[in-house]
Amino acid sequence: MSATARGLRLPLPVVLAGAHGHGRWHLENIRRLQLVGLVRLVGVCELKPLVGEELVGFGAVEQSDDFGALLDTTGAAVAVVSTPIPTHTELALAAARRGVHLLLEKPPAPSYEEFRRMADGTAAAGTAVQIGFQSLGSHAVPAIRRLVADGAIGEVTGVGGAGAWVRDAAYFRRAPWAGRRRVHGVDVVDGVLTNPLAHAVATALALAGGTAAEDVTGVETELFRAHAIESDDTSCVRVSTAGGGRIAVAATLCAETSEEPYVVVHGSEGRITFWYKQDRVQVVRGGTESAGSPALYGRTDLLENLVEHLMGRAPLLVPPAATGAFMRVVEAVRLAPDPVALPADAWRAVLGERAERRVVEGIDGLVAVAADTLCLYSELGVSWARPPGRDALGLHGASPGDLHDEVNTS
């Protein structure tokens, strides 16, 4: 492969920061891309080094808990950052100072201020940043946009999202920051909508055409918790956009049974449902499923897309500018009152495989109804939800300095 204008040659040397937990998925993905000659793992940044079979097939891999030093000694062109949320900005900027491009896990930052610092700093350094919303690499996303543009469901009336997952108490003990809003005064914002089911929010915003920070004019939040944690595990949010759009997403980690999360585009003449983890799309018009529905789509891997972008062959799919609206939601959750503990009669304890889990009564159906009606929990007559507006945050209350133009780092 000849050198590009950026002076890069395949395979691109990659450092992985955070190789345990979700980082294991990235490790296997790097292994896959190394086999086809796109990347080469040259370093792993971890407090607990990888050993034995974990590194089979990679060749010589340097390991260190000093991210900056590892980038310097390995000559990395790309870093994959899958570390705790509060570390994202500093690691991204450390890479940018060295001209190293990034795949940065979601959420990109715990606050809008930190997000802007990361986006502006990496843009100034000229480094490309891909934010790890894998669902936005689905080929279903542009396909749904084409369906909407072609009038397949009439005029769009709103976009809903639903996520009903099961997580036990051990899930919230997996790391010191898990289930926390802050640690030692530092923002974490590890809520159900901002981390485990963040894809539902980001995908709903993308299908509503409101991905930039300036697209968002208001955010209403209702945050609750059944588990004995600091953050929220059962919440909903409704976003208003400058174009008059409405996006409502409801999610829980306290479901009776785990279901595939989805986003639904409501139209005056039908609806399009997108199960984003499966890349599956169903079109219903006039109460009848359309021919060829449901359809399955392919997906472009985000690290692969970053490599293609750096070689001058493709635009970035998820640059920071495409996640500004999502970060407005994160900021609304961060600034909202602390999650309300659900009363004991609203949930029941169930013994799971590893630990106890808590099931909120009726939440599976409630999440679906919220996505269907674009209503908040409090508007659906739930006894434990507060009256409408009690936990609402309008972005009109933000300081003017919070609103900046988005930066495209591509």
Image (cartoon, helix red, strand yellow):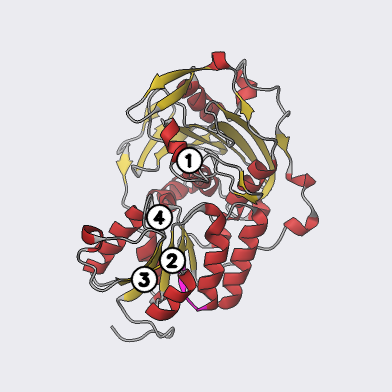
Instruction: Give the distance between the C-alpha atoms of the residues marked 1 and 3, in whole angstroms.
Output: 27 Å
Name the residue tied to disc 1: 197
Please name the amino acid that badge 1 sits on: Leu
Q: Are marks 4 and 3 in contact (CB under 8 Å)?
A: no
Estimate the x, y position of residue 357 in percent, counting from the top left. 43, 26
Pick the residue in front: 158 or 33: 33
Please name the amino acid that badge 3 sits on: Val
Marks 4, 3: nearer the viewer = 3
Residue 14 tag number = 3
The structure residue drawn at horizontal position 41% and vertical position 40%, both measured from the top left corner, is 274
Estimate the x, y position of residue 194 in percent, counting from the top left. 54, 44
Between disc 2 and disc 3, whose residue precedes? 3
- Check the image and report above or below for 407 versus 383: below
- The answer to whether residue 404 is left or right of residue 309 is right
Name the residue tied to disc 2: 65
Pick the residue in front: 172 or 305: 172
